Image (cartoon, grey):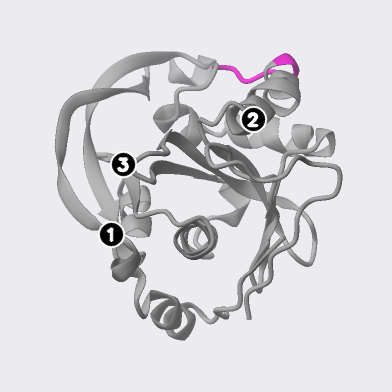
């Protein structure tokens, strides 16, 4: 069962702008960021694994988080670049992570997806579940034809998400991303930039056939999705 509900008070969907949306699965709710998310978001963005692979400020401060929630995330949607959603547990409403669409090409109906998972929530299949839900929404409701993922060559956890979704590895962009690694005085918070390759993954509508059922059988969570 698929349901579609506009968020009250928001503008009607435009052909070059994603609607303000909330997407629910059996375990998760993906929705626009709220001010109440800020403490958990700061904690997540300062986690070592996130600092290593993401290109946000380091350390990630209260000012950074407020700028993200108030200005940057909303502007990505209204400006047509993509959409950024907080991912929360359905039962506890605790922040699980985030999922973000960016570099959206409205003519070719393609976009890139990135995802972050809080350290306490890793190993539960939340990243795969959230990206699957947003992919189904993009393909079935928004008429998109391609989703791209770009994973650092040494980030095996992110690559596993792509593989579970049925993404096809399409090539390698050499030295295409700046990552971070601990310096010798890493215990004092030292980081240094390093270059890394990016593996490019593509996901088309036909690639998702049967994926939800396979993940439900393997991971124990259901295939029900609802967007509003």
Find residue 1 and report its image quarter: bottom right
- Horizontal side of 90 relative to 162 (left or right) equals right
Q: Is residue 203 visible?
A: yes
Cα gap from disc 3 to disc 2, whole angstroms: 26 Å
Q: Nearer the viewer, residue 55 or 48?
A: 55
- Horizontal side of 84 relative to 212 (left or right) equals right
> Which residue carries the number 2 mark?
78
- The disc label shown at residue 167, or none: 1
Kind of element beneath mark 1: loop
> Which residue carries the number 3 mark?
151
Residue 132: image x %, image y %? 47, 63
**Measuring 55% from the left and 79% from the top, which residue is drawn there?**
223
* Dominant SS type (magenta): loop
Residue 225: image x %, image y %? 61, 71
| Start-end of magenta stretch | 58-63
Residue 37: image x %, image y %? 77, 38
């Amino acid at each position: 069962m698929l349901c579609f509900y506009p968020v009250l008070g928001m503008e009607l969907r435009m052909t070059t702008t994603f609607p303000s949306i909330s997407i629910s699965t059996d375990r998760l709710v993906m929705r626009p960021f709220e001010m109440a998310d800020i403490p958990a978001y700061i904690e997540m963005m300062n986690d070592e694994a996130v600092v290593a692979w993401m290109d946000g400020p380091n350390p990630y401060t209260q000012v950074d988080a407020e700028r993200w929630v108030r200005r940057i995330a909303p502007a990505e949607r209204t400006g047509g670049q993509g959409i950024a959603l907080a991912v929360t547990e359905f039962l506890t409403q605790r922040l699980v992570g985030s999922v973000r669409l960016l570099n959206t090409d409205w003519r070719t109906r393609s976009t890139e997806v990135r995802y972050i998972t809080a350290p306490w929530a890793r190993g539960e299949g939340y990243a795969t579940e959230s990206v699957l839900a947003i992919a189904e929404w993009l393909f079935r409701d928004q008429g998109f034809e391609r989703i791209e993922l770009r994973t650092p060559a040494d980030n095996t956890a992110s690559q596993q998400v792509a593989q579970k979704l049925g993404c096809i590895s399409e090539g390698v962009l050499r030295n295409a991303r700046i990552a971070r690694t601990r310096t010798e005085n890493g215990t004092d918070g030292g980081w240094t930039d390093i270059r890394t390759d990016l593996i490019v993954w593509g996901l088309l509508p036909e690639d998702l056939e049967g994926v939800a059922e396979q993940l439900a059988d393997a991971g124990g969570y259901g295939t029900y999705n609802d967007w509003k």
